[in-house]
Each structure stands twice: as C-alpha cells, then as structure tokens.
Amino acid sequence: MADSENFHFKNEAGEPQTIKSKDLVASIANQHGSSTIIYLEHEGDDTSATPKLTIAQGDAPHTAQPPDTSDTETHIIVSTASGTNKATSFYAQVVQPVLETLYPKGHLNFILHHTKSPETIKELASDVFLPTANAGTSVRIILLSGDGGIIDLLNSLLSSPTSKTHKTPQVVLIPLGTANALYHSINATTTDSTWGLRNLASTHTKPLPIFTASFSSGARILVDEARSEQALPKHPITHLPTLHGAVVCSWGMHASLVADSDTAEYRKFGVQRFQMAAKEALYPSDGSAPHTYRATVSILQNSEWTPLMDDAAQEHMYVLATMVSNLEKPLCISPASKPLDGSLHLVQFGPTTGDEAMRIMGLAYQGGKHVDDPLVRYESLEGLRIAFEGKEGEGRWRRICVDGTIVRLEEDGWVEVRKVERRVLDVVVG
Ligand SMILES: Nc1ncnc2c1ncn2[C@@H]1O[C@H](COP(=O)(O)OP(=O)(O)OP(=O)(O)O)[C@@H](O)[C@H]1O
C-alpha cells in the first residue's frame, strides 16, 4: 500500500514496514514470486552524505518493471574527480548493487568506465557513443558526475555529423558533482531523494534542451586553475569558436566566482566554495567596492536584438542566461523555468555594494524571490550577446562561464548565446 508520503510493505517475516516514499528506489517482482524493495536511508539532515542502501525481500506493490536491456548498449561512467571525489565509492556501495538487483542478467553486459583525465568523457563520446548511436544501436549512459560530465558528452556528440540511422543516446543522471544544476532543476518539482537511482529502472525520456555559445576568434578556455589556455572547438559551418551548453552562460559576478573557486583548495569545501569566492569578490581585501563590469549586453527577443540599456548606462554586476531553474539544489535562479522546458531566461543586475549583492543572492536561495526585486532584471529571451568593445582592460573581467567551463575573451571580444533546436541527448526521467 502506498500513501503519498509513505510506502508500506511486509518483510520476509511478514512484519509490516514503513519507509518514506521519497527514499524508495524501486519495488520490483523477483524470481521467487515475491518482491524486492530497494530503498535508501539518510543519516540526519545531511542530504550530501552518502545514503545507506537497503535491499529487502518481502511483499509489496510493484513500482517499476526494469526494461529489457538486450537491445541497448549500456555504459556507466564514474567521473572520479567530480565534486568531492565520491563517485567511485558511491558507485561501489550504491549504484552497482542497485543495478545488479534491477538487472540480474543484463548488468553483466554493462560497460564500466572510470575517468582518468578531463578528456575521458569527451573521448568516450566521440570514439564510442557517437559511432554506436550512428550505427542505429540504442545507447544508454549512466553518468555519475556533475554538470561538467553532461557538457563534455554534449559537446563531443555534437562535434561530428550524425548518420541517417542515428539513435539519440539516453543519459541517466546520478548527481555526484558540486552544484548538479541540471539534476536539481529536472527534479525541482519532485520529492525524489534517491540521487537519481529511481530513474535506473525508468524508460521515460525527454530531450535535453540546449544552447550554443559562439565566440570571437581569440576566445580561449582556461584550464588547470587558469595556468593554461586551450583553443575552443570550431563550428563546422561558421568556423567560430563554439561551445554548447544546457545550464548557464554568464559574465560578471557569477562567472568570476565559478572561475575563482575552481581550484583544488576551494573544491574541498564542496558547494560552499561558490559562496566563499563570492564573498572574496564582493568584499575586496583593499576595502574597495566590487568591480563594475563594462560591456554592451544585448538580448534577442521575437527575433530582434536590442541593447539591454543605452550604451552609456551599460554597467553590470551580474549577467546570466540560463536554461534551468536551479543552479544548486537550494539556489533557484529562474523560478519561471520548468524542468526541460527549453526556455532561456536572463537574470541581470547593475553595479552595487557587496551587501546589496549578498542580499539579492540571498533572495535567490529563498525560492527565487530575487526576480521580484526592483534591482533585478528577469525576462525570457531567445539569445544574449556580450561585446567588450575595449571596455574591460583586464582579462579577469572578460571571463565567460558556459556550464562551468571558463572562456576568456579578447579586449574587443564577444560571445553570442542562442537556443538551438537539436536533439542530442535524451534525459531519463521518472
Ligand atoms: N580523473 C580525472 N582527472 C582529471 N579530471 C577529471 C577526472 N575525472 C573527471 N575529471 C574532470 O573533472 C570535471 C568534473 O566536473 P563535474 O562538473 O563533473 O564536477 P563539478 O565541477 O564538481 O560539479 P558541478 O559542475 O555540478 O558543479 C570534469 O570536467 C571532468 O572531465
């Protein structure tokens, strides 16, 4: 029997048991004619701590029927350096036993990959997943990573043309990164506390909406804690440096704090690293005011580009276009965005004091109340363009964030973001 909050079952001794429905991964029929109930137990209120997995036998209504996997090539990617390096132990302690239970025979054919470098996921996508999908085989990728893993998949899958027989690969997101914006946005309206494990038995998918960011020719990706630079992939037709994203493109305070906090030292602090870097940027050690960011920002609405404001008034602190509602589980950046709805929203505010910026961002952590603040501009759009036109001398103020990747532009550089209609990855949903 299931009520909305609790799931009831009888254990092997016939004793009644109750668990929270949100912790139930699946209740499935087993070969003994009874049920196998898979659920998680959380320690205290710390939702970031690895939960305890329980697999019980008993009598229960069935909530899932794991699909036949014989026609699908299933890959598991464990992104070993995501978040606080927990993906390896989470796979061994939680994901692997769940897969063995859901797919007693099928899991023997699943192909397991542990990442060895920042290139592993990109190489798998271009060398294995794309050719397999192009040959007309169904590919399902179980991805234990943060947003970076999805972006790596996306960009590599888009780097070569697809064939006539191509089948869009599916991805099951298991959130093992720092912010996990895409996962938390897809699940913003659900009460699922199973770290995406419930979707391991699901056959429902939705296309992942994406955007394209095109850059001026001198744009470079900053890597290795900004100690080195990399060229961006070039678009096959426009030949412009190009990145594809599914979460966010930002400049100003957001891009700076993502960039500044992407060091081994900061990463140890998990999701706190973003707020720590924000404080450093907003309260410079010399006591000066936070930086005023200067560039011409334009928005695309109803197929027309319009500057956000008069050129002389173009000063900013926060400029961000997003396809998701939540940048972190508690940080609702765009309350009007619904899961995988394909919308793009602008969040912008101008130069202000550190205290005011903290107040505005504090409202975002209260369910997205910042969008009602008079200082914040919030609207739906089809594209965003940021052109520096020599207005920012120092490179650190010309850093753009595309889903966590940091791109530094030239003094007269520019970036243009547009939604694109292309089906590259299907996300498995509940
Ligand atoms: N073994 C490894 N060595 C070096 N880099 C790795 C390794 N494994 C994964 N990476 C890279 O580390 C990055 C991890 O990014 P990911 O987004 O998954 O985690 P995160 O940044 O902690 O989370 P989020 O983006 O959700 O905040 C990816 O770019 C990935 O390619």
Image (cartoon, grey):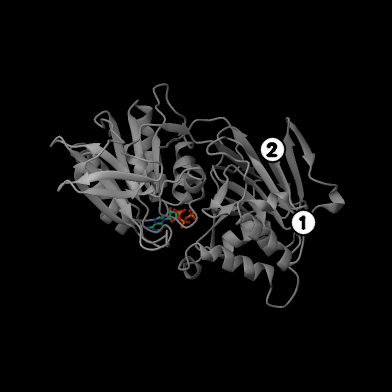
In the picture of the structure, the residue carrying the numbered disc 2 is: 381
Q: Position of residue 254 (x, y in %)?
A: 63, 57
* Residue in the image at 48% along x and 37% along y: 159
Crowding at label 2, few (<14), some or many (≥20) Cα neighbours within 10 Å?
some
**Which residue reaches farthest bottom?**
286
Does residue 227 appear in the picture of this structure?
no
In front of the other: 164 or 5: 5
Does residue 195 appear in the picture of this structure?
yes
SS of the residue under disc 1: loop
**Mark 2 residue CB less than 8 A from any atom of ligand 1:** no
Of the two numbered discs 1 and 2 on the same chain, state the one appearing first in sequence. 1
Q: Position of residue 216 (x, y in %)?
A: 66, 45
Q: Is residue 212 above or below residue 397?
A: above
**Mark 1 residue CB less than 8 A from any atom of ligand 1:** no
In the picture of the structure, the residue carrying the numbered disc 1 is: 350
In front of the other: 348 or 213: 348
Quadrant of ligand 1: it is bottom left
Q: Position of residue 145 (x, y in %)?
A: 41, 51
Crowding at label 1, few (<14), some or many (≥20) Cα neighbours within 10 Å?
some
Q: Is residue 150 above or below residue 365?
A: above
Q: Amino acid at mark 1?
A: Gly
Q: Quadrant of residue 122?
A: top left
SS of the residue under disc 2: loop
**Which residue reaches farthest left?**
32
- In the image, taking residue 318 as reference, residue 83 lies left or right, namely left
Q: Amino acid at mark 2?
A: Leu
In front of the other: 397 or 178: 178
* Residue in the image at 40% along x and 54% along y: 176
In front of the other: 207 or 325: 325
* Residue in the image at 84% along x and 49% along y: 311
Residue 392, disc: none
